[in-house]
Image (cartoon, rainbow, N blue to C red):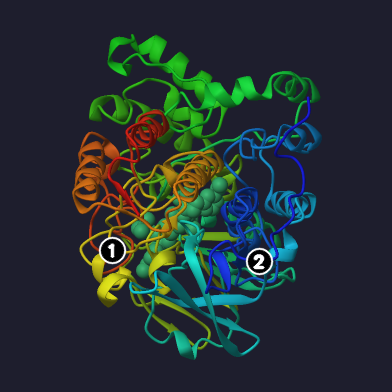
Amino acid sequence: MPDSHDRSLPSPEICRFGGVDVDAVVVGAGFAGMFMLHRLRGLGLKARVYETGDGVGGTWYWNRYPGARCDVESMQYSYQFSDDLQQDWSWSEKFAAQPEILTYAEHVADRFDLNRDIQLESRVNAAHWDDRTGVWTCSIEHAGEIRSVTSKFLILCVGCLSAANRPSFPGFERFQGPNYHTGYWPKDPVDFSGLKVGIIGTGSSGIQTIPHVAAQADHLTVFQRTPNYVVPDWNGPLDPTYEAEIKADYQGLRRKAVTRPSGIWVPFNTDSALDATEEERQRRFEEFWGYGGLGFMGCFGDLLTNAESNRLAADFVRGKIREIVTDPEVAEKLTPDNIIGCKRLCVHSSYYETFNRDDISLVDLRTEGSIEHFTETGLVVGGIEHPLDAVIFATGFDAMTGSFEKIAISGVEGQTLKQKWEAGPRTYLGVQSAGFPNMFMVTGPGSPSVLSNVLVSIEQNIEWITGCLGTLLAGGKSRVEPEVDAEDAWVEEVNRAAGGSLRSTCSSWYNGANIPGKPLIFIPYIGGIPDYTKACEAAVENGYAGFRMR
Ligand code: N01
């Protein structure tokens, strides 16, 4: 069947709006920025994408650490806007690794002829709204020079996890060895052979990195502040029969997926863990452990709403850790005591086994003392120096707001976004923030973003923004912004939804607790893709209720 979107659209030579360099500036050339550009061209708007990196791919461009891999099945973690694309592309594994996902991003950029409107190695440092002219001016750094670019629309496709968190440990400047952050990994492969390596952090990035570095280094020391639950992914080559079945009705799978809160189609039960007998429960836990991946949380319907059900699932995984890890003391250190799924569940099939090696040690920062300081040749914890030749920071991100706030954005009356979000982010539907007209966010705070298959959320947001801009243009208007009342009500809804989930009960990057001084607010919308989409569609059906167009 011909696909109306699967073709290259010419970029208009001239702007639709007068007095600006481009109609729209898009910040970031990850999966969001690339698709946004494609849709803006479809609207006949002249758009330009600015990207800090020297290639497309966003998250998958920066996170090149050894072992980086997606924990959503690749058949679902992929674009659906073009049926030709999804039919033509073949993934080699069930869960693709970073290099393959980056190749996919590059393929999309070529296939839709996006590169000619993407300016690489260009950082947008600031964006200023002039309320009199209704124009955004961006300050863009490229090759050591700063240039101003004016536009009617500013579309932030900056990603949720792209402002690295690098805690400042005393004495770090004295450390003589190389240091790395998983979120800014060098392009050239790093060889840890023969080295004593330290890694700080045991979230998803650390957990994926640790088995690879342990296999290569002379010795790996893991500095763990909070142990995490890790479930296996049982990754392997993509089964061609499974691929063919999906491709026979790809849209059917996509339609089913968006009926789920996460936008991912995996087995999911709705019954309570408390209603099952002990035997049934264990059988179900084993079944889902065998299925693998994030879908483990779909064993029972109430694992994230009922503390007792959650404890039963957590106990099951704790039992697995004790079975796999041979040294009981190490197993104890690796065993989490918090709510399973409260922090993001981690996925890996040989993480716990790695701790059975004799060239790895685990430093438990909860019981052995916190990180005191670096020396020239090591890291001191609880008065003991751990000798290191190299250190890896797997310390995560200033998530969801950091990537927006690192651009100096000022809106109406010069108010900055950082000022406005001082007590926590405020958006309407996660796509706009009052006081910042014509500025859109893709997977912004207050949208499901990181709680969903982010590719699903990206496409949903972009289709919505495209519809909004199309309506604006069709009506001969040039300015759109949310009303404060609508925004306030949405912020309240985001908080209400968070209150109903056990996910808001622990410290995590979901609520800003990982960054000292960041307000403790549950940032994404946890109500799920179906309810969120309904809210977005309701606004449209009611004539863009809550938005002011003029
Ligand atoms: O970051 P994290 P990440 N002293 O914040 C520790 C996605 N992702 O990069 O838990 C000592 O989860 C911190 O300790 P604690 C995914 O959504 C996906 O690993 O705060 N330790 C924690 O252990 C994921 O959730 C994939 O006590 C410090 C670690 O550093 C998100 O990205 C792969 C510290 C940070 O963990 C972020 O994951 C990778 C300090 N001062 C990432 N500060 C997949 O698709 C922080 N830590 C599989």
Which residue was labeled with disc 1? 435
* Closer to the eye: label 2 or 1: 2
Residue 220, how many percent across, how many down?
58, 64
Q: Which residue is drawn at 47% across and 68% down?
A: 164
Which residue was labeled with disc 2? 14
Q: What element carries label 2?
A: loop
Residue 5, how many percent across, how many down?
70, 39
- The quadrant in which residue 519 appears is bottom left
**Is residue 15 depicted above or below 527 in this figure?**
below
Q: Does the residue labelled 1 lie within 8 Å of ligand 1?
A: no
Q: What element carries label 1?
A: loop
Q: Residue at x 31, y 23 (%)?
A: 302
Task: Say which quadrant the N terminus sits in.
Answer: top right
Q: Which of marks 2 and 1 is nearer the N terminus?
A: 2
Q: In the image, what residue type sits under mark 1?
A: Gly
Residue 194, how many percent across, how many down?
71, 72
